[in-house]
Image: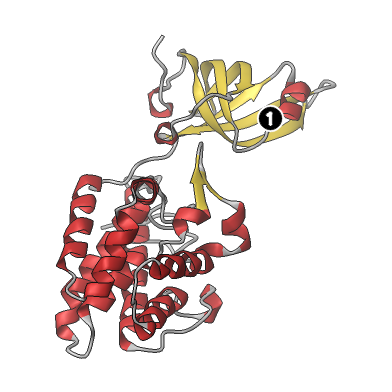
Amino acid sequence: MAELLVNQICPGATVQGTFALKAKKLLPYREAPGHFLAVTLADRTGSVEGRLWEGAEEADSRLKAGDIVTVEALAVAYNGSVQLRIDSIVKENGRIDPAKFIPSAGRLEEAEMKLMQLIDSLTQPYLKALLTHIFSKQDFYEAFSRAPAAAQYHHALLGGLLVHSVTVASAADGVVKDYPGADRDLLVAGAILHDIGKVQEYRCRGTVEQTDEGRLLGHIVSGVLFLDRAIAGVPGFPADLRLKLLHMITSHHGRYEWQSPKRPKFLEAALLHQLDLLDAQADMFSRAAAGREDGDSSWTGWVKGLDRCVYCR
């Protein structure tokens, strides 16, 4: 039997497949002793509610949110939606492809090509050597090109970090001609590198999760540490250029209240902050409009990351 994706499940369907366990809650029966287990299951196409009526306490004790689970169930109609009546739910311990559970960013091949073009276009020899040194390492490049740029707010997709970084760098390349005082190569290189610490901040399995390093340090600190080690691998790298690149990573969030250790202190750092914010917010507006629950409405519901509703017409 072929596995059904969430968006293919309809009432009456027999479901056998693997899902990410997004949430679970043990609840008491209303009119009888005992409990049932309410779960939210998800894959890259969406989420579906499920109920395990027998063996709920035992299942609750061996499962946790974030697990990948193998489920056997019958899909039924409930309150105008589809719900799974679960017969079996077991933690899956085998090799997992995150692409089954987390959507992938679009334009990945285009972004990969553009990244290489931007690196090749650098004329400052030390910046070009540094980025070539970083991205020529196959293991790191593969991790960078599959990493998300966030857990939920913007570019929270496989490959989201690559697309976000390249979009910011391309915008930097376009805007720099209007600011004659800006160093084009420094701005483009800083844009490519500004979120480099997110390779260490996130891991992907059934969902995008923060690593221990992400929780304890965050991507700004991780990015500074990573970049300083990479700079040490480029003989003769100028001290002032090192400080500027490290400052651009340190200050790209722009404001102390946005967990930025420093505010931008020179033109390229200030431009990078604005371009990073621009791309992040553009993605949040676009995804909010595309994902609104009521397709006939001109408005989304409340969008947490933007702190507002979004107009869609």
Q: Residue at x 43, y 28 (%)?
A: 6
In-image side of 212 versus 7 (left or right):
right
Q: Residue at x 58, y 24 (%)?
A: 92
Q: Which structural element holds mark 1? A: loop
In which image quadrant can residue 286 be found?
bottom left
**Which of the pair 125/25 is nearer the observer?**
125
Q: Residue at x 52, y 18 (%)?
A: 76
Residue highlighted by disc 1:
63
Name the outermost residue toward the top: 1
The spot of residue 218 in percent (x, y) is: 55, 63
Mark 1 Cα within 10 Å, few/some/many (few <14, many 20+)? some
Q: Give above or below for 308 relative to 61.
A: below
In which image quadrant can residue 46 be found?
top left
Image quadrant containing the N terminus: top left
Q: Give above or below for 69 relative to 151.
A: above
The spot of residue 52 in percent (x, y) is: 66, 21
In-image side of 101 versus 57 (left or right):
left
Name the outermost residue toward the right: 33
- Can the viewer see residue 157? no
Image quadrant containing the C terminus: bottom left
**Which of the pair 81/156 is nearer the observer?**
156
**Which of the pair 212/255 is nearer the observer?**
212
The spot of residue 138 in percent (x, y) is: 33, 46
Q: Amino acid at mark 1?
A: Leu
Question: How many numbered callouts?
Answer: 1
How was this image coloured? secondary structure
Q: Residue at x 85, y 21 (%)?
A: 33
In-image side of 155 versus 112 (left or right):
right
- Can the viewer see residue 144? yes
In-image side of 105 versus 55 (left or right):
left
The spot of residue 289 in percent (x, y) is: 33, 54
